[in-house]
Amino acid sequence: MKIGIIKDCVYPYTKGGGELRDYMFAKEFVKMGHEVSLIGMKFWEGGTTVEIDEGITGVGITRKSSLYTSKGVRSLRDSIAFMQACSIYNLEDHVGKVDMLLTDHVPYLHLGNVQAWAQHLKIPIFVTWHEYYGYKHWLKERFLPVGITCGLIEKWVMGFGDRVVAVSERTKDRLLKAGADEGQVIVVEGGLDNDGVDAVTPFVHTSDVIYSTRMVRHKRVDLFLKAMKLAEERMFHSHAGKKLKIVLTGDGPLKPELERLAGELNLDVRFTGWIPSLADVWGYMKSSKVMVHTSEREGFGFTALEAMACGLPVVTSNEDSNAINQLVTHGYNGYISDPTVEGFATGFIRMYNQRLKSNLIPVNAKVFAKKYSWTTGAEKLIKEYENVR
């Protein structure tokens, strides 16, 4: 079977959680004997297509555009450009026939054209939702007329697809509250390459705390840095004047601003930029003691789960928009805090001190992470798709 997965971003050329999910499921589909095309913007040099991995082809249906504005929010220009690229004619020309079709809900406007292509092919379409934002989010992020329009579009496209695939129970709950058809929504969580994580050796460079993320507004890296400064000040006497060693993996439009902030706070921060190898990200995680994840919203939380597989307790917030707190049992494999400088600083100090005293929480974190498998999720997607056909 030929499987098409449509998203504006394509792994490994961009490295968000959604792209990683598509790539890992693609690898599992190939193991089952299928052929996969990851269809999106052309982020690579050369021709329209590129071999990403054995059995996985990247298909660029339009040239790449800037995904984020200088303020660290998604660009509307990207959404419009990708919508135009997802016309039936363009998809037929670049991709041809597929037997199974999955697409991401972001960047929204493309969904009408993709559904029209599915109807043209006479096959079902599954739409993956990582998060449902709602009007409150859009009005906070955009100017009033644009925010209202974005909220209306999000509500409108929620009806597209033969199945709505929520990446977590939290996302499913938010979709249902927004009016999604309960019979249409299924949950297929993300997975983890536990064997790959286990094979990685920690780096020589060690750190006290790590945050692996994109440098965009809703990840609140500024909040992370301020919380680590407060933690450092509070630990000064109890830990013999300790200077925290901090690692931030990832990149994004706010990186220069955050580097300046780290300098103003006099923090010892290693900004790695994008790391091409997942194994190297895990190497940094295994060389650290705690992950603090300050993101305002997460549909699932791959980096938090990877950190747990590396033996790190995860400090996260108690916000309803943050599904990572569904992965964390307070005091067992991490700490759930208020989304404040005080809250995250307290959570980090608690987890750091517990790691010094005992290896119990790292063991708990690893045991929890072992529950997640990409194979299980891929098999469920195939089965659900066959049921709808």
Image (cartoon, rainbow, N blue to C red):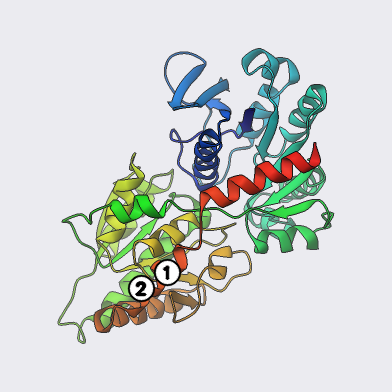
Graded by Cα atoms within 10 Å as few (under 14), some (14 to 19) or many (20 or more), the crowding at tag 1 reads: some
What amino acid type is highlighted by mark number 1? Val
Under tag 2, what secondary structure? helix
Residue at mark 1: 367
Q: Circles 1 and 2: CB distance less than 8 Å?
A: yes
Q: Looking at the image, which is closer to me, 173 or 346?
A: 173
Under tag 1, what secondary structure? helix
Residue at mark 2: 363
Q: Is residue 156 left or right of residue 342?
A: right
What amino acid type is highlighted by mark number 2? Val
Q: CA distance from mark 1 to mark 2?
A: 6 Å
Image position, residue 78 (x, y; %): 60, 32
Quadrant hosting residue 119: top right
Image position, residue 330 (x, y; %): 49, 80
Image position, residue 116 (x, y; %): 80, 27
| Res 140 label | none
In the rendered image, the quadrant that contains the N terminus is: top right
Q: Is residue 325 above or below residue 343?
A: above
Q: Is residue 250 above or below residue 33?
A: below
Q: Looking at the image, which is closer to me, 384 or 213?
A: 384
Image position, residue 229 (x, y; %): 31, 71
Does residue 63 appear anywhere in the picture? no
Q: Is residue 273 left or right of residue 35?
A: left
